[in-house]
Image: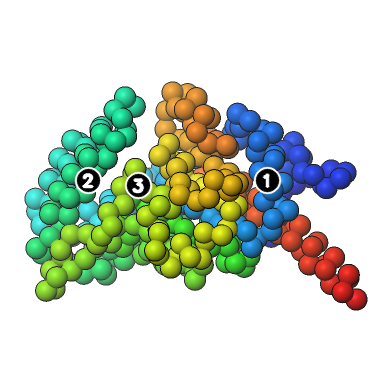
Amino acid sequence: MGCDEKREPAGGKLLVGDISALTRDHCRMRYPAKVERIINEFVMGGPERMQVVSDFDYTITKQRTEDGGAVPSSFGIFNACKSLPENFKEETDKLYHKYRPIEIDPHMPIAEKVQYMIEWWTKSGELTSGFPFDQSEIDQIASKYKHALRDRTHEFFGDLQRLGIPTLVFSAGLGNSVVSVLRQANVMHPNVKVVSNFLQFKDGLLDGFQQPMIHTFNKNETVLDGNDYYDLVHTRDHIIVMGDSIGDADMASGVPASSHILKIGFLFDHVEANMEKYMDTFDIVLVDDQTMDVPRTLLALIEKQHQLNLQAGKQSSL
């Protein structure tokens, strides 16, 4: 696994300035000293204390591709399926144009937005009901986009699997599409869990979405309570959170207050207009970075120290 640091300073403490992936122009940090402190906590804590929580749309998938082609969202993959009723796309577009401006309105309180999100989700579920549908259609569309993941995503998920780090992919989109893309890209390893909105069927026909609904403002670890995955991760207090929208930064809400959380934000649209808000919200802001190089670098540092600890343990037992 390629490690991106230049050298380990005397005394063993890692400095942000010595980690080349964090010194590039497109990598911005408001509080480098905070990032440095958290990275050192991660490195000393080792992989057994780590978990990763990531958004899917435009976080695991690219915000732009080399050929300029658009990457559809997980719901966009579903909407491209040929067998959907004629009026389905028209009606879902109407809902999008009504509720999306509310979702991103910077002035409306979140408590008020939540009611609208529930309304949007409920109406979408009603539209997604009463007709036959085959998952293979999603698989067919998803296969076109299995290569639209960020560069080195395959290696990143391989690193996570090898180090035994639980990885939660949280999506307010359509889980059927998310799982299909990840599976066809060969990154749906046993340590990966997808929490999202999944289609449900009744008497062979679509019947909306399974509960609980996952929307932008409840997409966090509080919805995992009583879930097997929660039992697996609630003691892992070192967390990398990755997302492309401001709301993604809260995906680790619900973990113990003593946790060390490093938030990585991928910023692509309206960079100058959004920069201040992203810098306020995320610890590391990556501007038009279509790779997984920064999170991989963090894992490389953690793994390097882990290997040193294992070697030291073997020697002391001799």
Crowd around label 1: few <14 · some 14–19 · many ≥20 (10 Å): many
Check the image and name the residue furthest to the right.
Answer: 318
Mark sitting on residue 112: none
- Which residue has dot 3 on it? 218
In the rendered structure, which disc, 3 or 1, sits on the residue that comes first in sequence?
A: 1
The amino acid type found where label 3 is placed reads: Asn
Residue 280 visible (yes or no): yes
In front of the other: 181 or 282? 282
Label 3 vs label 1: CA separation? 27 Å
x, y percent for residue 264: 54, 42
* Chain-order first, disc 2 or disc 1: 1
Res 39 label: 1
Q: Secondary structure at mark 1?
A: helix
Badge count: 3
Please report contact status of discs 2 and 1: CB closer than 8 Å, yes or no.
no
Q: Earlier in the sequence, mark 3 or mark 2?
A: 2
Residue farthest bottom in this picture = 318
Numbered disc in front, either 3 or 1:
3
What residue appears at the point 77 percent right and 44 percent down from the top-left corner?
A: 14
Residues tagged 3 and 1 counted as in contact (Cβ below 8 A): no
Colouring rule applied to residues: rainbow
* Pointer 2 residue: 118
Q: Quadrant of residue 31?
A: top right
Q: Is residue 77 visible?
A: no
Which residue is drawn at the image coordinates 47% and 58% (left, top)?
168
Q: Percent x, y for residue 274?
A: 45, 27
Mark 3 to mark 2: distance in Å? 10 Å
Q: Secondary structure at mark 2?
A: helix
